[in-house]
Image (cartoon, rainbow, N blue to C red):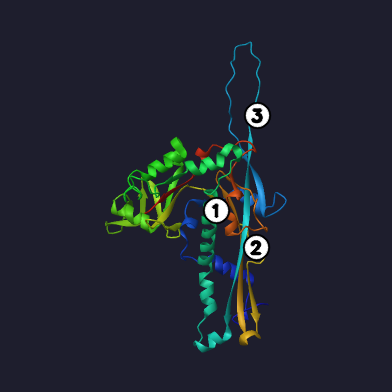
Amino acid sequence: MAKFDSKTFNAEAFGKYYSAVENTKKQELKKSRAVVSNAALKEVFQNNSQTGTAYAVIPYYGLLAGDAQNYDGVSDLTPTTTTTFEQGVFTYGRMKGWTEADFAYDITGGADFMANVRTQIQEYWANIDQDVLLSILKGIFSMNGTELKSANKNFVAKHTLDISKTIAEATDETTLVGVSTLNTAIQKACGDNKNKFALVFMHSNVATNLENLKLLKYLTYTDAEGIERELGLATWNGRTVIVDDSMPTEEKKGTNNYTQYTTYILGEGAFGFEEVGAKVPFELYRDPKHRGGEDTLISRIRNAISVAGISYLKKSQATNSPTNAELQKPENWSLVNDGTDAINDKAVPFARIISRG
C-alpha cells in the first residue's frame, strides 16, 4: 500500500477527494459555455466504438441540396444523395509530479507541503487545459493552405478583423476596439448567421478600453434588501464578455512600438470536451533513501476534444498525444470536409479581433 506523508494512501479514495474539491479558481475559457460535454467523444474514446483510443474520425451529416425537378407528369425523377463530411477528433494526455521532502516538514514545524499541492491540483489542470484550448485557437487561425479550393485560408481571412495594423489614416481610435468593432467582426465572419456568436474573450486592457467608452453593460441583480448590485458580468452588443489576461498578446517592434491584443468570439459549444481518464490518474511514490526521505505525488490526465466545424488532421504529431506546439501548427487543422469541398464557414462559430487595445 502506498503512503501519503507516511500514512496509508488509497489511490481510489484520493481520486474521490480530488473530484470533490470545489471553489478553486479556473481559467475563464475552460469554464465557459464555449466548452461543453460531447456525447460523440464519450462514445468514441470512452466506450471505444472505434479501433484506437487516441484519434478518431467521426461523420458529419451533409445538408439536402440541389434544385428540385419539375413535377409535370412527363419528366423522370433523377434522385441525388447527401454528402457525408468527416471530422477528426483527438485526445491529449499530460502528466505532472510534485515532490516534497521529509526534512522540509521537520524544519518548518510540521508544515504540510503535500497538502498544499493537493488543494491546488484542480486549478493546476484547469490552467493546463486552457493552454491546450488557446493552442488550438492559434492553430486554426494559422491555417493557410490552398487545398479544398482555399477554404481554410479563406476562413481565416473572413473570420479575422485586424484593426491593429498601421495605415496612412490610422489614429489611436481606429486601432482600438470601438462602437462598431464587434458587430463588424461577426458579420464579416458569418453574415446573417452571426447570431451563432455568444461569448467574447478579451484581455483586461481591451475590456478597460470598452469600459472607458461605456460600451460594456454590466448585468445586475437585486439582493435580499432590495438593493440593485452589479454581478461583475458584462455584455458587449448582447454577447457575454469574459475578461481573461491569458488571451494572446504580442509586442510589435518598429517605428511605433505597440502591443497587439487578440480577442476571440466564440459560439456556445465551440469546443466539445470530455475527460477520458488515465489508467492510474494518481499515485504516490515514496523514496525513503533520497535526501532523507521524500514523497512524490504523480497526477495524469487524458482528455478528448472536438472543435465545431473544424477537423484535426494529425499531419504533424510525433506521438499519440499532441503537444501544445503541435496543436499550434496550421497543417494539423482544416475545415470539416468530404475530401473535395469544405462545409460553409458561416457555420463555424469562431472569430477574432486583433487590435491595440
Question: Pointer 2: what residue?
Answer: 278
Check disc 1 and report its element: helix, strand or loop: helix
* Amino acid type indicated by mark 1: Ile
Q: Earlier in the sequence, mark 1 or mark 2?
A: 1
The image position of residue 133, as x and y in percent, is 53, 55
Circle 2 Cα neighbour tier, 10 Å, few/some/many (<14 / 14–19 / ≥20): some
Residue 3 badge: none
Closer to us: mark 1 or mark 2?
1
In front here: 18 or 357?
Answer: 357
Q: CA distance from mark 3 to mark 2?
A: 41 Å
| Camera sees residue 202 | no
Judged left or right of residue 126, residue 299 is right
Number of other residues with Cα within 10 Å of mark 3, as a class: few under 14, some 14 to 19, many 20 or more: few
The residue lying toward the viewer, choosing from 34 and 206, is 206
What whole-number distance in Å separates the C-alpha atoms at marks 1 and 3?
Answer: 34 Å
Residue for badge 3: 81
Q: Residue at x 49, y 42 (%)?
A: 157
Residue 297 position, x and y percent, is 60, 74
Nearest the camera: 277 or 287?
A: 287
Q: Position of residue 34 (x, y in %)?
A: 49, 51
Q: Quadrant of the C terminus?
A: bottom left
Q: Give amino acid for label 3.
A: Thr
Q: Is residue 340 above or below residue 258?
A: above
**Residue name at image x 53 percent, y 76 percent:** 115
Q: Residue at x 43, y 39 (%)?
A: 188
> Tag 2: residue type?
Ala
* Residue 142 image point, x, y percent: 53, 49
| Picture quarter with the N terminus | bottom right
- Judging by the rendered image, the residue that carries numbered circle 1 is 136
Q: Is residue 201 left or right of residue 210?
A: right
